[in-house]
Image (cartoon, helix red, strand yellow):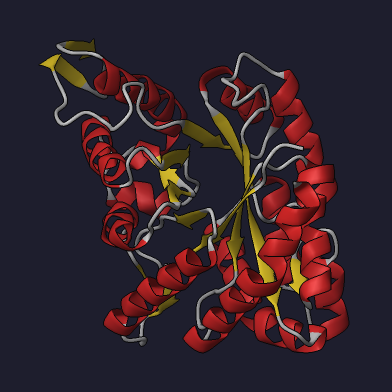
Amino acid sequence: MAKLNIGIYLNSQNPETDDARARLEGLVKQVKLAESHGFDSIWAGEHHLTPGFHFFPQLPLLAHLAAYTGDMTLGTNLLLLPLHRPVEVAEQVALIDIATRGRFILAVGQGYRREEFAALGVPFEERLPRMVESIEVIRRLWTERNVDHESSSFSLKGATLRPSPYNPSGPPIWIGATTDRAIRRAAEIGDGFMATPNADNNEVSRQVQLFARSGPQRRVQGKPAVGRMLEVYCHEDADEARRRAAPHLLTKYASYAKWGLTGSAGEAARAAGTIEDQNDFTGLAEDRFVIGKPDDVVAGLLEQHRKVGVTHLAMRLAWPGSKQSDAMECIDLLGAEVLPRVRTELS
């Protein structure tokens, strides 16, 4: 059976009162521990001006962490492409790709928070055409010399990007999407599809199948590349795993709802805001999160690959306000007991 890439999604968002230096040092420790256990990848997200929280800038964070990742792949999940100039993205990603010797995945999305677009001077209504155009421009900058491009958004005359990425074709560009139309678009212009963490397994499986039969996406060994951020927490005691994860995970989902996340992902975020007790959380988590003892997590990760169709998992095991010690304990347990069992099952 095809390999399942199992990685860690880093929590870049923390309460504004937290010591940012300590949190950054904590991420370095998490990456080092993940590398020592042989995880496959490290991922980070992007948001700007998040009231009540600080959020580490995505590409500078990944560049900083690249020195500690060993042979692990680095990826964005997601880079909000319309908020950026394609030349800047192409340059920064090319450098990180060089630092990781070609182990970088650029996963992008449109974005949905109007305040981010207003703050960065980008018309919200232009986010889709800007994303599509930027993907084209970035690919050309990575693979061509003397690039000419003229539009209402970007103008290039004889542009040549140096240094170019590690691989001649540049890193793969995956596209995050939640609606059917966007998923079909991802198959047309993307190298892979990044699914939402919020929807349940049945919905993500349906999306994966839609992506696979919509083409002509580039394929890795004949199989479409499909990533998913997955909410995961592992502890020897399942009740303790839920106790540690639930309050912080729900705080994050309350942010999604407040920020205006739409579609099936938005529905899950809004549902999280109505949770009042442990039973309600268990109902939300079923078929959506993987939280419990090692046996539970092994079964949940295998299901993501075998039934849902995911090829790359970015496990988010810390959320705003989570303790560094809890994150480290979870990574250690996943690396020691879960990762080897999943790999053996899939070998």
Task: Look at 46% across and 39% down and name the residue there.
Answer: 108
Q: Would you identify the image quadrant in which residue 146 lies?
A: top left
* Residue at the spot 33% in from the left edge and 75% down from the top edge: 24
Name the outermost residue toward the left: 158
Q: Is residue 83 above or below residue 28?
A: above
Image: 88 above or below 240:
above
Reply above or below: 86 against 54.
above
Residue 250 percent across, percent down from the top left: 65, 75
Is residue 203 visible to the viewer in this orientation of the structure?
no
Whether residue 336 appears in this view of the structure is yes
Image quarter of the N terminus: top right
Q: Which quadrant of the figure has residue 29?
A: bottom left
Q: Nearer the viewer, residue 131 or 294?
A: 294
Identify the residue shown where x is 72% and y is 69%: 272
In this image, 118 relative to 247: left or right?
left
Between residue 250 and residue 87, name the one nearer to us: 87
Q: Nearer the viewer, residue 212 or 18?
A: 212
Residue 281 locus on image (x, y percent): 80, 76
Across and down, in percent, residue 51 comes to 40, 72
Q: Which residue is pictured at 36% across the width and 87% down the height?
A: 17
Q: How many marks on residues?
A: 0
